[in-house]
Amino acid sequence: MSTTAALACPSCRQPMHQQTFAASDGGALTLDMCFACQGLWFDPQENTRLAPAAVIELFELLHARRLEQHRPLAQHLACPRCRRTLEHGYDLAQGGRYVAWRCPQRHGRFATFGAFMVEKGFVRHLSSLEIQALAARVGTIACTACGASVDIRRDHACPWCRSALSLLDPQAVEQALARFDRAAQRTSGGISPEALADALITVERAREREKRERQRRRLEGGERLDLLSAGIDLVWSWFRR
């Protein structure tokens, strides 16, 4: 844990959680993250310095705090360094298109947990058959790239950021780790779209049931599948085998 003063979240303005991770150069770096807003602040170049080994630790942290209350992002995000409004933009990585907000004074950038996973290649795009299988079970999902609600019965891409619908899953993680020159821990076999959809729904409903039991309240706004949270649970269970 860092001893420096916590930065204010660009969205909710509350102090962000600080966590120290291994850096790719052999040192360490401290990331600032807000679990309520599900976002990370990166000082310049921090997003490229995270060591592959630290990704597992990040998964563990996200999984451990997956049941905490989430807030929607504010309409206007402010740089925690200079307080200027962050500029909304898009980046393209191997995992697809994702949203990022940058400080006009180059102090850094803010990205959602899902966008970070897209950037690092830990997601894969859902196939048309998988989207159809999910659409038959739920109507709305959360976009992994920006967090917006997507009615997959009508839209097969996010209408807000135009990102393809993506899933954080074990095989994508395995492939990304291999690209980072880490040995793959397990081999993931093929899975049918229907089986994947059922697994995601099972994980999400179990997660929400646990959340309701712990927080003693109902999920607001109807059933909405959070692909990022469900995917993290699937990947974490895979790592823990």
Image (cartoon, rainbow, N blue to C red):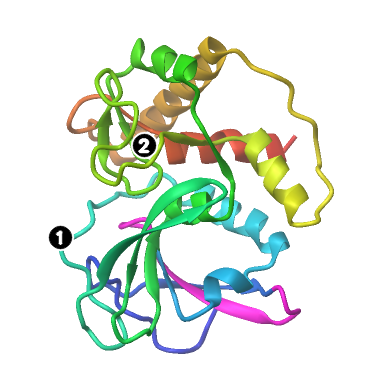
The reply to whether residue 74 is in sight is: yes
- Of residues 66 and 121, the one nearer the viewer is 121
> Along the polypeptide, which appears first: circle 1 or circle 2?
1
Q: Is residue 165 left or right of residue 188?
A: left
- Expressed as whole percent of the image width and height from the top left, the position of residue 237 reads 64, 35
Q: Is residue 132 above or below residue 77?
A: above
Front residue of 53/98: it is 98
Q: Quadrant of the C terminus?
A: top right
Other residues around mark 1 within 10 Å, as few (<14) / some (14–19) / many (≥20): few
Name the residue type under label 2: Lys
Is 197 situated above or below 14?
above
Give left or right: position of 223 versus 43.
left
Give yes or no for residue 83 being in the magenta stretch: no
Residue 134 position in % (x across, y down) = 40, 17
Q: Residue at x 58, y 33 (%)?
A: 234
Q: Is residue 8 left or right of residue 197?
A: left
Range drawn in magenta: 24-39
Disc 1 on helix, strand or loop?
A: loop
171 relative to 86 in the view: left or right:
right
The CA span between labels 1 and 2 is: 27 Å
- Residue 29 in the magenta stretch? The answer is yes
Residue 36: which disc? none
Residue designated by label 2: 211
The residue to which callout 1 is attached is 75
Residue ID at (35%, 10%): 136
Q: Quadrant of residue 28?
A: bottom right
Of 162 and 236, nearer the camera is 162
Secondary structure found at label 2: helix
